[in-house]
Image (cartoon, helix red, strand yellow):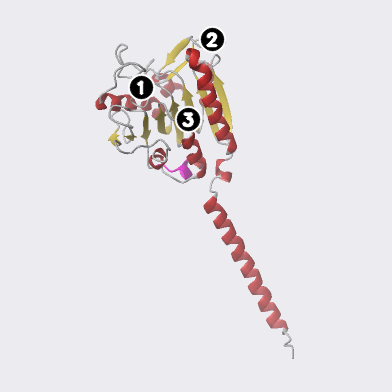
Amino acid sequence: MPVTETGAQRARIRHFRVIGMVLFALAFAVGHLAVDPAPTLAAGKKVVIVVGPTGSQTASFIRDAKRYASVARKYGAYVKEIYSPYATWSKVKYHAQKANILIYLGHGNGWPSPYGSFQRYTKDGFGLNATSGNGHNNVKYWGEYYIDRYIQMAPNSVVILARLCYASGNSEWGAANPTKSTAIKRVDNFGAGFLRAGAKAVFAEGITDASYIIKNLFTTNRTMKQIFYASPERTMKYRFGFTSSRTSGMWAVMDPYRPSRYYRSVIGKLSLTAGAWRKY
């Protein structure tokens, strides 16, 4: 004989069904966030990509830059591309304001180097077009003084220096490999102006692909240090760290693939997480 439900029983069953639906929705939402933490926070991030004049190599640098731009756009970023022969200081200065990621590919003019004494006006910054539209050999260097004085990046912003001499501690092609102390000074000096401009981490990839940094910023909650060691090109065998002498409170790590081969570095607030980066 079938059992009929009373009004009170039906009400209680509906009550439990509602609770179950709410709990399922919450579980789904939490699970979804755990798998893909980035979309709502990452959309609209400002990414500025600059390629300076590098003579016959400029087209190769621009190809790399366009690949980085494609990766950033995939995650919903607003991307501004500034390429030689139109990458002048006035254009870069204007568009770099409040950038969340600033990527520079081009010549590096760092310190220590064989070229004169240290000064902040041409060292450790950008090599850009001296004049607009006049080829890929008209280079003028805008050093850390100008970056520090005229650019204000977004809070928790990140800089990526790709294929530069000096920025990761390396020397120019054909020159002698640096000592460890010289490589450390180069990384420290190249990071200084960008850190004073508001960046919290300055990555340098002298010869290896930097797209992993962009992907990790948009899709993980790793720290800057963990992102650095997430590179497919990491070696770890000769890694070391140091406290910055140029920028108080900042730390750096370097990951040479063998002694005197300094092609990967990061300097800044390395405990900063990608999640904190996405909040701004």
Q: Residue furthest bottom?
A: 1
**Residues at marks 3 and 1, CA–CA distance in whole angstroms:** 23 Å
Assign a secondary structure to mark 3. Answer: loop
Q: Residues within 10 Å of mark 2 (few under 14, many from 20)?
A: some
Q: Residue at x 51, y 17 (%)?
A: 58
Q: Residue at x 49, y 32 (%)?
A: 101
The residue under label 2 is 135
Left/right of residue 112 with respect to residue 278 in the rendered view: left
The residue under label 1 is 166
Q: In this view, does 138 lie above or below 189?
A: above
Assign a secondary structure to mark 2. Answer: loop
Q: How crowded is mark 1: few (under 14 residues within 10 Å), some or many (20 or more)?
A: many
Q: Locate the N terminus by quadrant.
A: bottom right
The answer to which of 161 and 149 lies nearer the viewer is 161
* Residues in magenta, as a range: 272-277
Left/right of residue 232 with respect to residue 92 in the rendered view: left
Assign a secondary structure to mark 1. Answer: loop
Left/right of residue 201 with respect to residue 100 in the rendered view: left
The answer to which of 36 and 18 lies nearer the viewer is 36
- Give the image location of residue 8, x and y in percent: 69, 82
Amino acid carrying label 3: it is Met
Q: How crowded is mark 3: few (under 14 residues within 10 Å), some or many (20 or more)?
A: many
Amino acid carrying label 1: it is Tyr
User: Does the rendering let one see residue 53?
Assistant: no
Q: In this view, does 206 lie above or below 276?
A: above
Select label 2 or label 3 by which is in front: 2
Left/right of residue 206 with respect to residue 136 in the rendered view: left
The residue under label 3 is 153
Q: Earlier in the sequence, mark 1 or mark 2?
A: 2
Q: Which residue is drawn at 52% across and 9% down?
A: 131
